[in-house]
Image (spheres, rainbow, N blue to C red):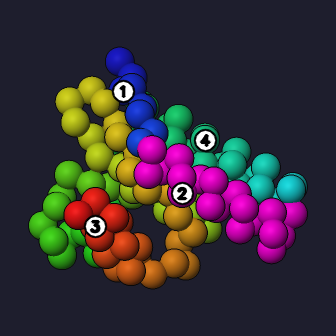
């Protein structure tokens, strides 16, 4: 039985920002390739969600229900709850994750 995937609004916004960055700095072909890798990686999670590792920055906070996969130069951070995978973050792997998480927390407060 496959898991259902829910891409949260925060991850949708991340995708838009990633798309804009890639189109501005690289090419439409690069974006298509990146997007295909992201979709394929997330689709593969449906069959085996534990495949991802626990992100180091999040493990330090003892939030071990979150995992990550690394399709290409990007990170997809997700959470598995029962039979649903919630995609929280899609970001370039070279970005400072601590700064991103801090910004996200401040946006919620």
Query: Is residue 75 shown to the viewer in this render?
Result: yes
47 relative position to 71: left or right: left
Lateral position of residue 55 relative to residue 38, left or right = left
Which is in the foreground here, disc 2 or disc 1?
Answer: 2
Total numbered badges shown on the rendered structure: 4
Q: Residue 101: which quarter of the image? A: bottom left
Residue 14: mark in rendering: 2
Sequence-wise, the earlier of marks 1 and 3 is: 1
The answer to which image quadrant residue 23 occupies is bottom right
Residue that label 3 marks: 105
Rendering coords of residue 47 (x, y %): 41, 31
What distance separates the C-alpha of mark 1 from that of mark 3? Answer: 27 Å
For disc 4, the marked residue is 39
Q: Earlier in the sequence, mark 2 or mark 1?
A: 1
Q: Is residue 9 left or right of residue 58?
A: right
The magenta span reads 9-27
Tag 4–tag 2 contact (CB < 8 Å): no
Occupied quadrant, residue 4:
top left
For the C terminus, give its image quadrant. Answer: bottom left
Q: Position of residue 45 (x, y in %)?
A: 44, 39
Mainly helix, strand or loop, the magenta region? helix
Q: Position of residue 64 (x, y in %)?
A: 18, 58
Marks 3 and 2, how far apart at CA: 15 Å
Front position in the image: 67 or 91: 91
Residue located beneath label 1 in the image: 3
């Amino acid at each position: 039985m496959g898991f259902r995937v829910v891409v949260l609004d925060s991850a949708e916004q991340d995708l838009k920002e990633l798309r804009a960055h890639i189109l501005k700095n690289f090419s439409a072909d690069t974006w298509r390739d990146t997007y295909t890798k992201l979709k394929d990686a997330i689709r593969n999670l449906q069959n085996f969600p534990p495949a991802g590792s626990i992100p180091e920055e999040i493990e330090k906070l003892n939030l071990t229900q979150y995992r990550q996969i690394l399709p290409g130069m990007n990170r997809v951070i997700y959470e598995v709850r029962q039979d649903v995978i919630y995609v929280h973050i899609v970001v370039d792997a070279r970005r400072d994750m601590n700064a991103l998480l801090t910004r996200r927390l401040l946006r919620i407060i």
